[in-house]
Amino acid sequence: MLLLANLEKRHATAARPLFSGLALTVAAGEIVALVGESGVGKSTLLNCIAGLENADSGSIRIGPQAVDIAKLDESARAALRARNIGFVFQAFHVLPTLTVAQNIAVPLLLCGVPAKEHGRRTRALLERVGLSGFGPRWPASLSGGELQRVAIARALIHQPALILADEPTGNLDPRTAHEILALLLERVREQDVSALVVTHSQQVASCCDRILTLTPDGLS
Amino acid sequence: MITAGNRSALGTLAWWLIRAQFRSRRAATLLSMLAIGLGVALGYAIHLINDAALADFARAMKSVQGDPDAVIAARDSAGSVPLADINQLARDPAVLVVAPVIETRVRIDDSPIPVSLIGLDVFSAAAVMPQLMPRHDDRAVLDNIFAGGVYASPTLLERLGLRPGDALTLVRGEQRWRTTISGDLPATHPDEQLLVADIAWVQQRFGPAEAVSEGRVRLAPDADLSTWRTTLAQRLPAGLLIRAADDDSARLSNLSRAYRVNLNVLALVALLTGAFLVFATQLTAVAQRSTQFALLGVLGLSPRMRLLQVLLEGLAIGLPGSLLGLSLGYILAVAFTQLLGGDLGGGYFSDSAPLIVPALVPALAFLALGCLASLTGAFYPAYLNRTQALAQALTSGFSQRPAAIVASPSRLALPALLALAAFALAQLPPLFELPLAGYATIALVLAAGIASAPLLTQTMFGWLSERPLPAPQRIALQNVAQAPLMAQVAASGLIVSFALTASMVIMVSSFRVAVDHWLDHVLPAPLYLRSKATPLPQPLLDALATPDAPFARIERMATASLTLDPRRPKVALLVRELERDNPAARLPFTGPVLTPPVAMPLVWISEPMHEIYRVGAGETLRLPLLGREVDVFVGGVWRDYARQFGAVVISRDDYLSLGGDFQPTDLALWPLPGQQSVAVAWLAPPIERYGLELADSAAIRELSLSIFDKSFAVTYALEAAAMLIGLFGLAVTLAASVWLRARELATLAALGFDRRMLSTAVMLEGALIAGVGLLIGLGCGVAIGSVLTHVVNPQAFHWRMPLAIPWPMVVAGAAITLAAAVLASRYAARQATRLAVAQVLASAQ
């Protein structure tokens, strides 16, 4: 679950805030698309929700305990992200020096799950994302679509409460993009996770449960 | 937050990342490891060798001297302890036993190598010097030690090929005594070559009458050494001293202390170079993996863990490097002691190879030092990794210009402050008799040089890049000017390595020039004749005085030694035939030459003596001469590079007027014009007969300079290693810089830059950075060279010399390094030309 209340963010040099008074609730199992023009603050909003940037005021509550990430220090935010948030990026961001299986297992390690328990869970999830047998391979040998499948598996393996996806199909061809989006939505619904998907694509947005548009006046 | 439960999971992640890092940066990691290993190896080897040499020397001393609580001896090596004083000491209730000893040097059967002959009283010696107790042999001709005969150490018997019962002749000057070997000395040190005989027998033949060389004292069990020593010192005659066991240890340690510390500083330089390499490797690794670390941060790796990860990677370089260093150090220690002896050719201890015994605590300390150096190198990159803004790093990678390092005029304050602090430290006197402030000055000069790099880079190249230039040159200039951190990292290796190399070249050159001039002054005669241990034989001196001798002039000198402080090595006393009114004809004075205001003995002291005992020209010095304390006037200070612990020259006339017995040991000989070969032939028979040494001044000069050059061989090897590491650091950093700017370079290629232009831009960048590094390095090198010459050398070795900068050599070195740097940057340039442009541009990373 994700709960935003009265959120405001302003840049030091700007006369008016980037956004203010933002309120949003994403329920468990709900997928919300966030659209808007370039520069309106979508990525900044996503960074604030992930605790990578500080909001100037308001609260951001995440997960079953509804912990306010805005009130945590840097280390506690990292711990909250490790346990409760999964990320999917436009640029995949798969670690090139780790194998596919190791990449997927990174969130498990950050949650303190011992390495001996990884094998079963990564194998099962690789199968669910259509990458059976890819575990020992290196990312350099994978295509863009395969890399994004790895990223989705990594985002879901620790069963987070929230998925934050920033243009998850932005670097893919239309056919692969469609497959990847379908996979992401299916897995998110299957695990009953809340998801916030930032996108410029109407096609992606139309597949979500709700579409919100971020404008200088707020969310609509 | 880390809990016990997830510690092992985080450990697994850390291990994966370390393994991945080592796999992808094999050469840089291995080189960093080797550099750390080299530093640890050198430091550990020096420690092992010195420890073993000191222990060996102490064992050898104990073997000859036994294990007395204290020793009573004459301050003047030509003096002795009157028997009356020994007898009085024996009546002291605090004294259990006094063992009188007479020690002299003799040659055996005209063998050129002299050995020690120790005369002892077996009854008292049994309590104090059990190692010297003789074992009578059944084959001996004489019944026991009191009947005469000598006892030889097993090593000496083996060397001479003699055995008990054999006859031999003991030779001292013109004295020759026939005797037989009555047995051996089973408990002496294996290296020891000495003879023992009854003290009365030795005294009767070699003297001194009514006196002995030393009294070795064993105190009563309830006596307190320091109280007894203080009491006795007050009533002891002025010419005598008390030496306790800890004085011997201190003297032993003082003997090689400065030399040892200097070698350790060289090892520390190697270790610091290793730390720098870890710094360069880890900084570029952090820069290259900034997106990956940012991703891990986004996924939930805490800032503390991101810091720890880079530190752990540093430790993963330092730990195996240090372990390798310990093994290498042990091997080096064994090899060096076999090749050069326990003092690495320093000339302080015997030539024997001491036994190297590694101990756990020092090994652990050196292991920790290696790890600490590595962690120090990794700390700043780790800090940068901790403080990188995650969202920004995830999209655009490592920020080359964090606010903290942007150069601005106010940044001049740091290097200026460091330079001022360095100047202030250079003025300080030695601490604990070591040039510690001098070493700190060197570190500060290097820090000031490195700190000035970004400002100099930005100012110089920022201005140049605004000039009308071809595109590749402009790109290279702009890049260097706008990425001061990478330029600083790349240049700092060259700054450090070139500064250290240039400074050593300057110091060694200054020293060599000074030694060369000094040799001109101190070797005026064409030939020099010396006796190895005993005074020159009178018949030879008489023959030299006859008109038949083919010599135009002869100057005689007698050498002895004085103990001014029992905890310090002895000071040489040189009694010379020189003109009291014109000593400058023979001695290279460093300041004014004064004459005493009143009639009193006149001496001239060497520069080390002036430094160690803080006494100067025009002052009065109290010397322990001829069994009493004599006030002498110091007429001047002369330069001496031969005797590190000080020397006093007194004219023969003054010495004789004080009641001294002038027994020459050295001669300076001027053959008649054109008769040098005749003179050498004339000297050949007495040299053979008396085991003397003859050398011409050219040979002495050649030998001295060759010893000088050999003693700096290790330094040259370290300089070469430092330069290679500096160049490697430049190549690695430039390659990383190319990697970081792959998108920029690919864009330039897409816009029409051909391979040659890209290659030119990158190589020019390398040349510019190297140029800045060498320029700053040269400045630092001259400064450090001056510190080594004017601060470290006088404080550590008590040698002063004028600064002589060998400009052609230094400039040629800089030019060669610049060329090598351009070649090294070809590696990075090749990477730039091999970029898969389309792929790089398509990739978001």
Image (cartoon, rainbow, N blue to C red):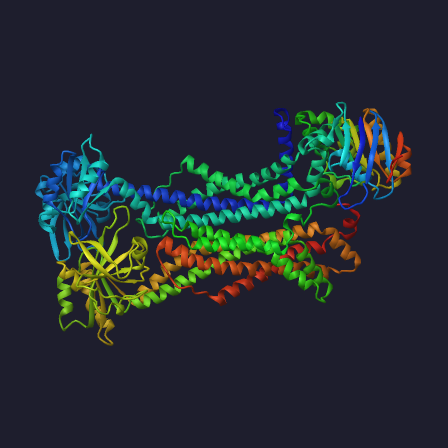
> Which quarter of the figure has residue B611?
bottom left
- In this view, the residue farthest toward the bottom is B673
Picture mark count: 0
Q: Nearer the viewer, residue B730 or B445?
A: B445
- Is B71 left, or right, of B736 in this rendering? left
Q: Nearer the viewer, residue B365 or B200?
A: B365
| The C terminus of chain B sits in image quarter | top right
Where does residue B407 sit, x and y in percent of width and height? Answer: 64, 54
**x 77%, y 43%: residue:** A11
Where does residue B749 sit, x and y in percent of width and height? Answer: 77, 57
| The N terminus of chain B sits in image quarter | top right
Where does residue B100 sit, x and y in percent of width and height? Answer: 14, 42
- Is B731 left, or right, of A60 in this rendering? left
**x 74%, y 40%: residue:** B391
Q: Let me know if residue A81 appears in the view.
A: no
- Is B734 left, or right, of B795 in this rendering? right
- Is B347 left, or right, of B454 in this rendering? left
Q: Is residue B287 above or below residue B547?
A: above
Q: Nearer the viewer, residue A66 or B109?
A: A66
Where does residue A176 sit, x and y in percent of width and height? Answer: 86, 38
